[in-house]
Image: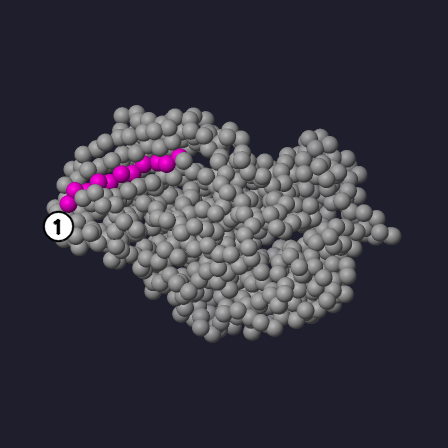
Amino acid sequence: MNAPTRNATTWTVVEDGWNPQRANYFETIFTVGNGRLGTRGSLEERHTGALPGTFIAGVYDAYDSPVIDLVNAPDWLDSEVFVDGVRLDTESARVVEHRRELDLRCGVLHRDTVFELPDGSRARLRTSRFASTADRDLCCLRIEVTCLDRAGAVTVRTGVDANRRNLERLPTYREQTAFGYERKWDKWAKSTHLSSAGAGFEGEVGVIASRTIDSGIDLAYAFTSTAEGGRRQQRSRHDAIEVEWQFDCGAGESVRADKLVGIATSRDYRAVDPPRERAVETVARAGSFDAAAEANRAAWDRVWVDANCEVVGNDRVTQALRFAIYHLLIAADPDDPTVSIGAKSLSGEGYRGHVFWDTEVMLLPFFLFTQPRAARALLGYRHHTLPGAREVAADNGTGGARFAWESADTGREECPQYTPDGKDRFYTREEELHVTADVAYAIMRYASVTGDDDYLFGEGAEILFEGARFWVQRCVPDGDSLAIRMVMGPDEFHSHVDNNAFTNKLVHWHLLQAAAVYDRMATERPEQLRALMDSIGLDPDEPGQWRAAADRLQAPTDPNCGVIEQFDGYFERTDVPIIEWDDNDMPRYPEGYNHFNCETTSLLKQPDVVMLLHLLPDEYSLVTRRENYEFYEQRTLHKSSLSPSIHAIVGLQVGDSRTAERYFGRSAFVDLDDNQGNTEEGIHIASAAGTWQVATHGFGGFRASADGLHFAPALPESWQRLRFSVHWRGRTVRADLGHRDARFELVGDGPSEQITVWDRPMTLQPGIPVEVAA
């Protein structure tokens, strides 16, 4: 496996040497972004088999595609460099040296490539790029060319290419057919989502406009390019603009061109001015590449103060944690509550940029405890798409709101019915209902951790109530009880099942929480409650119906209920033993089995019950949690990137540390080591969040509950210390955890805070470090 070089500083990820077969992998892991947009780490000049892409959060379109796509937006990197007419690329000139380095501390991708020209002389191409975190409308590129052995005529051409398309559908080929890196993306059908809407220059500022064909979103890019000592030319056509610089470069001398790009769309949150004007203004206020780079670094420094997570004594793990956190940070926009994070973040076209339950269950905890503004924005997306959720419920014959399994810009269901090659049917769009309860869970967690009752009694309550209405109507009588039939749990190997334990228990919990919030509002915010009831037509009798439904619903509610049956009849499914493990020490499919033919077996893609124990640990005794973990762990294939991290956390909680490091490694290095072989399609962003959770909630023993913060560290032997910060109700607690001691500091004004460390209560005073011995 051609894994990236790991720099001992733990703040960088490095590609050393050029391997075209691994290029798509590095395109993903070298994504630069700022939460508003992400740009894959493709070479500026491209190469055969490249899969470039820039993705702007919320810019979706369904023209020319069966379900909606996150649009592959105009390419702001588009560049070429020539020396004496020879194009500097990996196929036109021989690569002598090649190194790229992603600086995780400030989100800058650096490149250094030495090419050999036909006459044996060498030229060096260096670039730096970033999407600014200080100004999320701004992207920057610097190109530097050095003639190492002799003088040469250097041409640098850079611009914006709006002729972009999305991958659409892969035709069905004979089994075992495989295509090399040069052709594999060519074999896909393509979708067109952009139409040109004008291109040209206003003085030295190039402006190009596009519009999404179906959704009607206007996009505008403005760019400037500056250089010293070069001769400038400007060119435009209907779908591209460019500036060309020509230099006379002496032997050993370097020439440089900088590029600033402003990006605006008509869907930008609270934007007033037209996109074209805003894009031009962005470039003007940026000033220069160096000024923009300094502002970007300062913004990242502020973010890392609370986001950083470090393992003293294991640089490899620290790098993996920071890599995961970097990708989480560039996936969320704290300033836009109308967008969320897709399953591949903004790093690739996998899952078409759709939003899943992963955001609320896997990603939100990281943002909740380190970037609460971003957490609030992510929850805002669910309220923004609540009208679409109401439509989904109505389409399925109920009232209230049912959140789509795959959501995009409107909240309507966007899950495809078939795999990309059309061979296999998905039933998730019809049956994987638990996402509505997962959203409710996220709302209550946010309210508990932040104490933000204004949110809970506003947008949060509306979502909770509408979801509860849906559940009451979705349940069906079964004797004296209520059942939920024809569903699919997180496992996804088993469809058309009744009374899925995970779904039923989360629904039970959702109904009770909605009723409790109604009661609190009746006491604490009666006028606000009346206004909400009038707005959504809520009858005063409905909360009583929610409680009554919860009482009748078949759900595992006994804290000592033994092994929980995943769904009705699961225990009767054929027990197929797992007998083979791959090079990552993870289970292989038993011979003859795959994702689509495990229905009649007890094999699991990921275990619903273990996830349930993770989300609601206080609902079940330690004995029950241990019994269920041991039962389901031996039946789980971990074919979801969500699965290993949850297993690690629950395993540590029930005293089974034997597998925790293995599962942690699977999660932490899923993309750095490409241990699932599909990183080229985009980052496994839920796995990145799970990695942070294993470190903090698992090995750090961190837990937040109604009575405060708890820490019970149990570090792996190779870790000397674990350091991270958590936000708690407006303030920050910094934790420095060892094997036999722990140190804490409370940051922020206000009264003292009670925490519990190894089951011992401790008092933190603001600004005064406290040390605890185990």
Horizontally, residue 409 falls left or right of residue 156, namely right
Q: Nearer the viewer, residue 265 or 517?
A: 265
Horizontally, residue 616 falls left or right of residue 121, namely right
641 within the magenta span: no
Residue 280 at x, y percent in the picture: 35, 29
| Residue 674 higher or lower than 33, as above or below | below
- Can residue 613 be seen? no
| Residue 465 higher or lower than 707, as above or below | above
Horizontally, residue 399 falls left or right of residue 192, namely right
Q: Nearer the viewer, residue 18 or 475?
A: 18
Which residue ends up furthest to the front in the rendered image?
Answer: 174
Which residue ends up furthest to the right in the rendered image?
Answer: 479
Residue beneath the point at 38% across and 31% down: 239
* Location of residue 256 (image quadrant): top left
**Residue type at tag 1:** Arg
- Check disc 1: other Cα within 10 Å, few if <14, some if 14-19, many if 20+: some
Report helix, strand or loop for mark 1: loop
- Can residue 152 be seen? yes
Residue beneath the point at 34% across and 40% down: 78
Total marks shown come to: 1
Work out which quarter of the rendered image holds the N terminus and state it: bottom left
Magenta segment boundaries in residue numbering: 152-162
Residue beneath the point at 43% across and 50% down: 183
Residue 560 at x, y percent in the picture: 74, 66
Residue picked out by circle 1: 150
Horizontally, residue 679 falls left or right of residue 246, namely right
| Residue 278 higher or lower than 398, as above or below | above
